[in-house]
Image (cartoon, helix red, strand yellow):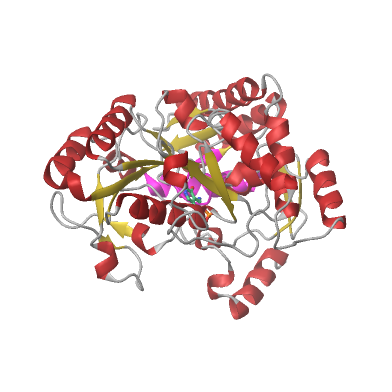
Amino acid sequence: MTSNNEILFERAQRSTPGGVNSPVRAFRSVGGTPRFITRAEGPYFWDADNRRYTDYIGSWGPAIVGHAHPEVVRAVQEAAARGLSFGAPTEGEIEMAETLCRLVPSLEQVRLVSSGTEAAMSALRLARGATGRDLVIKFEGCYHGHADSLLVKAGSGLLTFGNPTSSGVPEDFARHTMVLDYNDSQALEDAFARVGERIACVIVEPVAGNMNLLPATPEFLQTMRRLCSAHGAILIFDEVMSGFRVALGGAQSLYGITPDITVLGKVIGGGLPVAAFGGRKDIMRHLAPEGGVYQAGTLSGNPVAVAAGMTTLKLVQTPGFYEDLGARTTRLANGLSQAAKETGVAFSAASVGGMFGLYFAEKVPQNYAQMMACDKARFNAFFHAMLDEGVYLAPSAFEAGFVSAQHTDEVIDATIAAARQAFEATK
Ligand code: PMP
């Protein structure tokens, strides 16, 4: 019997490149047919064949309180009934800005936008405008959205300037981005020693989630903070993924390191398009209309999206929310590791707050090279075996996973039981 997912995928490919609106959804890395989702509730979603899956991507992070949370849905319905978009300021935007500034240590002011890409791109322009410098440092394996300056990989040889990772990005742009190794403090020291006076900013995922899960070492972030301060460069933490995910105050609150600019997205929109960037007032004052760095958006601070985000931010402030979420995620990581051990599969798992990493490697990888050495074929087999068991993991060996507050111990234990079968199938 042909599956409805296959029929939809065929049809989608006729009108949309690759049949999807964001590449990772196409299952290119793992093979097979993407599931077309019809509805979601709590920790689950259902596909076009009405099969239920326990969802461990949660819309790639936003669904931290679970899908279709009744309070969030109600807030969205009420906001929608008052009008969808005004193109003029609202009190909700002030409340959102105040909430973000209260909860995230580095924020004195924020600007709301509609995607993480937009937020990171704008943060970069702001850093360049505020410093009057062009050079950006990023790290291999970190993703900051698809702005030209950030779709760059390391050039050949140490301390060379970057090459585009996408066609359509001019080499001239890429030359203003230097790409270094994540968790390599010495490479940072060398870069600042060589061109410190030209560096506008360093942008980093303090807990990287775009090369599977890879937390920065405290020493790496401390080195970055010290070098940026010493050379007048701006330190940007991209917390689009880690913000309100690894802790209420983001990774910066876990590490006790305060960046100059923070980029947020995902959770702060609760599943609708809200992202933000913000930081110290003396930097933020460079933004239009106060300063000369231009940035704008027709749907920025959209009232319906802000209602979803604010309700989500209210729910995550429930006492004990992150303790519970962290405990559930640890339960999952430990349970999966144990199941792998029992079946004799070389596997490890790690988690930070509500984010986890699964690695087909004996030990948890500590850098990009170790991450890339994980057994991708094994992961792909495991992914499909889990899918058959009704568990939806990120369809790539190099993405992090996400747990929501609706993933109860029972849900997690059922996943671990499924994994035991799946590990057997991948041996
Ligand atoms: N930064 C990070 C750390 C991200 O994980 C992502 C998206 N996965 C982005 C930026 C881009 O966000 P968006 O997809 O909303 O443009």
306 shown above or below 150: above
Residue 380 visible here = yes
Res 55 visible = no
Image quarter for residue 268? top right
Please, which residue is most extreme toward the front here?
Answer: 290
**Residue depicted at 82% across the width and 45% down the height:** 75
Looking at this view, is 239 or 106 the one in front?
106
- Quarter the N terminus occupies: bottom right
Across and down, in percent, residue 337 comes to: 48, 27
User: Toward which corner of the image does residue 283 lie, by quadrant?
Assistant: top left
Q: Is residue 394 left or right of residue 138?
A: right
Q: Residue at x 25, y 59 (%)?
A: 176
- Which quadrant: the C terminus? top left
The answer to whether residue 246 is left or right of residue 374 is right
Residue 232, percent from left and from top: 26, 40
Residue 341 vertical position relative to residue 75 in the rendered view, above or below:
above
- The residue range painted magenta reads 374-401
